[in-house]
Amino acid sequence: MSKILKYVAGGIAASLPASAAFAAWDLNMTVGVTELSRDIHGLHMLIFWICVLIAVAVFGMMIYSLVKFRHSQGAVAAKFDHSTKAEIVWTIIPIAILVGMAIPAAETLIKIEDTRHSDLSIKVTAYQWKWHYDYLDKNVNFFSTLRRDHDKARQLHSGVDPYSVPNYLLEVDHPLVVPVGAKVRILLTSSDVIHAWWVPAFGMKKDAIPGFVNEMWFRADKVGTYRGQCAELCGRDHAFMPVVVRVLAKDEYDSWLKEQQQPAAAPVANANVESAALTVAKAE
Amino acid sequence: MAHAHTTHATTHAPGEKYYVPHGSPWPIIGSVALFTAVSGGALWLNHVNSGPWIFSVGILLVIFMFAGWFGTVINESENHLFNDAVDRSFRMGMMWFIFSEVMFFAAFFGALWYAREYSIPWLGGEGVKVFTKFLLWKDYESAWPSNGPGQVGGDFEVVPAFGLPAVNTALLLTSGVTITIAHHALRAGNRKILNIFLALTFILGFIFVGLQAEEYHHAYTELNLKLSSGVYGSTFFMLTGFHGLHVTIGAIMLTVIWFRCLKGHFTPTHHFAFEGVAWYWHFVDVVWLGLFIFVYWL
Amino acid sequence: MSTAHNLTGGHTAGHADEHHDHDHHGPEKGWRRWVFATNHKDIGTMYMLFSLAMFFVGGTMAMVIRAELFQPGLQLVDPQFFNSMTTMHALIMIFGAVMPAFVGLANWMIPLQVGAPDMALPRMNNFSFWILPFAFSMLLATLFVPGGAPAGGWTMYPPLSLQNGTSFPMLIFAVHLMGASSIMGAINVVVTIMNMRAPGMSLLKMPLFVWTWLITAYLLVAVMPVLAGAVTMLLTDHYFGTSFFQAAGGGDPVMFQHIFWFFGHPEVYIMILPAFGIVSEIIPTFSRKPLFGYDAMVYATASIAFLSFIVWAHHMFTVGMPLAGQMFFMLATMLISVPTGVKVFNWTATMFKGSISFEPPMLFAISFLFLFTIGGFSGLMLAMVPADFQYHDTYFVVAHFHYVLVPGAVFSIMAAVYYWLPKWTGHMYNMKLATWHFWLSTIFVNVLFFPQHFLGLAGMPRRIPDYSTQFADWNMVSSIGAFGFGLSQLMFAYIVISTIRGGVKATDKVWDSGTPQGLEWTLSSPPPYHSFEVAPEVK
Ligand code: HEA
Ligand code: HEA
Ligand code: CUA
Ligand SMILES: [Cu+2]
């Protein structure tokens, strides 16, 4: 089944403008750079075309009737008003179609939920309105906030033309950095309200819920910089807490990690886990 | 489909006609009353001094509205303006109102169930949420009753099921019996029994409320069990509290129809108000059983 | 509006008039008629006008939203205010525009369609209506309090919604009042239908509008109290130290979402089932052919209502539910397409081999058929959990629900008004103008909402006042559509008001061209102030 999906996915990826070049008039879901995102895109296109087919059939029938049986053209109404056979047919067929959609959906879902055997675990804590990344037991951790120049530009009446700011609203001071080809497990929580961590190219979105930890994973198989946004209303600046992930080659990643591992970072790490727990503990 | 060929019965006896009241001031008074009450409430919660006063005025208006509205209906009923169809409407209306009440309690029972089956175990690191314990609540062991990993409200003890609550259960179940006896008496036209057992019913009801108050006092002063004692305190007091409120209202309604009985209202065949209140009372009774089992006992 | 015949309540030639007796008067004079109203027609009229007003208020807020989103960068409003607009827009459109419109139609049409003298509980009927103006005054008042109106989204998720200051209790109490109003309205509908049907009108002879409303009323009575419970818990969490939605106290913010959507999903069907009923009345009339598969339609509606209770968590696929839960809610949700499909197919079969003419009500019904179905398809796509991980909280969702709500629910309401307005007022409206209103609405609504599918798929989150430049073009298109659609609605208001004021007399059957079924067409246009005081016999 999933083979068919990949095939469909490939076909569509070619036929629809999903690349940055056409970004402005983007029409379709990105294919992304992970196995999951490709499966999801394939699934998306599969359902899409099924719906198109049904639409063609149903709308075709409607349009035919509307044109063929016009009163103005002297059409005379027939008398029939029911047919049990018809009812059964158009109950069974949709059910069959649905089963056909449910199977690949279930397959993909099971794959998505399997967060075991990860190469790297990162604890992501959401704040109003920034992200905190904590590379578990690597004692590397830092906040990731909308970059200054973007923050200036987005103020009411800032007078700055958004087009003059590359990647407007999708640039942070410290992007998350991960190695290519590694299964990264994200452990999501929040310190205040509910947020959602989302990078379309990775195909996954999960809520960050205060007091609970949600899991999700991705394995990016293409180096590059990938951008997303907080995807759950979290107050005034919900629109201004982007997610930026830099996927590096293994060795580059290792050297990056080294230079981050200043001892100073260590205490901050716990401090943050604490503060998270504390803010939650405070009854509203 | 309904075929639109209609004819009209040429004769019809009076009383066969469905009573449609003309212009009534009570609903708009009710709307104004509710609005006043909630405005007062909103101000109160925002710490505006006038809040409590406006709120009280609203509540008084609500009471006034009910008195006036039901008074009007009682008069109409005593003047035989209601035919069987109207009576049926009232019954159906009451049933669906009670059903909506059931759904209101369902929300809170649902919360209790969710807390016990999901959130508490999850916080304890069970199921899909292992990392929740590991990263956020290291030293929390899930258990019930619980005020959560934050120990919100501090240590507390719970009210044992087989003390006061058991007594209360007995009281309510008995009151369920007494009102049934009263109903049979009414049907049999035995007003004496009716009056006695109806009185017994609301007396039992008020005793129940008294004991509930006693229990709350005990909980707050000796058990340190408060509305703010984490999710246990929340569910415990919201469920028993709303139930207590309903018992109070029910007992008041019982008192009202008791006075109506004394005034000789209701006939063996025609006594919707009585039955409506009786249904309501049984509903309150059943909710309590749910409470006793799921809140106090298990 | 004063000269419309039935609105001044003059006794028009109606069967009821032969049965004069002491307690049968016309309407009271002046304001008392409306404030003390117990007449289902008067109350229905008030509901409809209230709904129209709220549609304009909520729409104006939508215009603010679309104006800010016209281009990237913040030009007009503060982000907090933008969130308030989004929140209030939704609450007002759902609880102030669509639901009251349907209740108004129920008030006007159900007694006429089942052959009853009035609604079963006329005083409570007045209560249900008059609570609403007060509830919405309270809600709209939040715009002027310190800290501004609620800005946590119409879904009121904690902990965010708890951050709202002064406006918070006002929001909660407004919702309580709306709930009380809906519950009483629903009880009235159930009782009227179950108890007041004319002799001979068995359940399976009832017009479909009555059927769909009966089932809708059950949904309302079942879920409105649950919403009341949910917001009550919010209130106690905020002010009385409870921990329902606090992890530290053993609660869970997600618990609110479960309770809310247990109400919320049936709620969305509450906004579409009466629409199904309306369309099922109109299509047969203008196809000059009886509704195809009446029984199947009834059973389909019932199954949709039943299923709507077990699909709520499809709004919460990203909260981290156990796998089994996600599977269950995905499959249950997909299933709803089946009975809904049955309805679409039956409507198509009704038009097939009919003799179709295109009066305004029919035009809107046809538009409903196509555009609702598109909205249904996107809904089905959203039901696929893995795909929803991408769609969730993007404009793809916004596109989905506006397709089912605007060309769905709202168009059906406009179809109903164009269908029954002549019956209510006794006046024909300006067909040409109405046809213009139809074409403008249908074209602009697609310009408005179709591009939002693209925006969502391209990755634009919902509930944001400003966005990255790659979303600019489609947003501009959508905003242009919005302004066009909004302005077109001014025509609707004009047509309705001018028709109430006067116009060509309408015949009793109104659509002599078509073949309108049902008791309402046996009465004069407008119907007498007290119709069916003696129940008609239905054969
Ligand atoms: C009138 C209101 C209405 C209606 C009728 C529907 C109908 C449906 N909705 Fe929608 N929905 C909303 C209003 C509505 N919705 C709202 C307001 C939200 C957002 C709330 C918020 O977050 O603010 C929402 C959100 C929403 C979500 C959550 C998305 C997210 O937040 O991530 C989902 C997910 O499953 C969903 C699914 C569906 C489905 C499967 C249907 C089905 O009922 C559709 C069935 C119809 C069809 C499928 C078309 C006709 C059928 C055929 C022609 C037969 C053949 C077809 C097949 C066999 C495929 N809806
Ligand atoms: C029945 C319900 C309903 C209806 C009818 C509508 C109608 C419209 N909606 Fe709404 N909408 C919702 C229910 C509804 N919506 C819900 C539930 C949400 C989710 C909220 C949330 O996320 O919490 C939402 C959110 C929502 C958003 C997303 C906001 C965000 O995520 O930040 C947008 C953005 O385009 C939008 C637009 C519109 C528009 C343009 C209309 C138009 O159809 C309105 C047209 C009507 C008018 C314009 C009024 C009449 C005309 C005048 C008043 C004259 C003046 C006009 C001009 C000056 C042009 N709606
Ligand atoms: Cu953080 Cu939205
Ligand atoms: Cu839903």
Image (cartoon, rainbow, N blue to C red):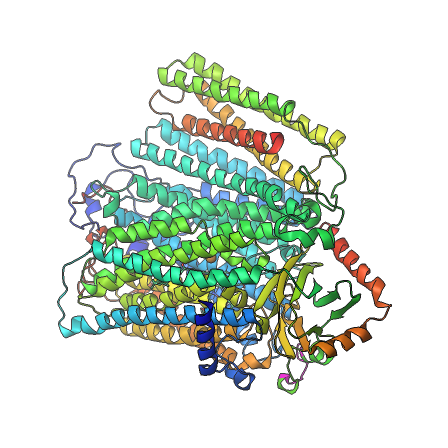
Q: Is residue A200 left or right of residue C445?
A: right
Instruction: Give the quadrant of residue A177.
Output: bottom right
User: In front here: C75 or A253?
Assistant: A253
**Residue placed furthest toward the right:** A264
**Residue at (33%, 68%) from the top-left corner?**
A54
**x and y, in percent, of residue A159 in the image:** 67, 84
**Residue at (25%, 65%) from the top-left corner?**
C428
Instruction: Give the quadrant of residue B27.
Output: top left
Instruction: Give the quadrant of residue C426.
Output: bottom left
In the image, the segment drawn in magenta is A154-162
**x and y, in percent, of residue B62 in the image:** 53, 39
**x and y, in percent, of residue A208 in the image:** 65, 60
Q: In this view, does C527 lie above or below A217?
A: above
- Classify the position of the C terminus of chain B by image quarter: top right
Q: Is residue A251 above or below residue A132?
A: below
Provide the major secondary structure of the magenta segment: loop
Q: Can residue C487 be seen in this view?
A: no
**x and y, in percent, of residue A230 in the image:** 63, 68
**Residue at (71%, 51%) from the top-left corner?**
B133
Q: Is residue C269 above or below residue C203?
A: below
Quarter, ligand 3:
bottom right
Q: In this view, does C496 lie above or below C488?
A: above
Q: In this view, does B185 lie to the left or right of C253?
A: left
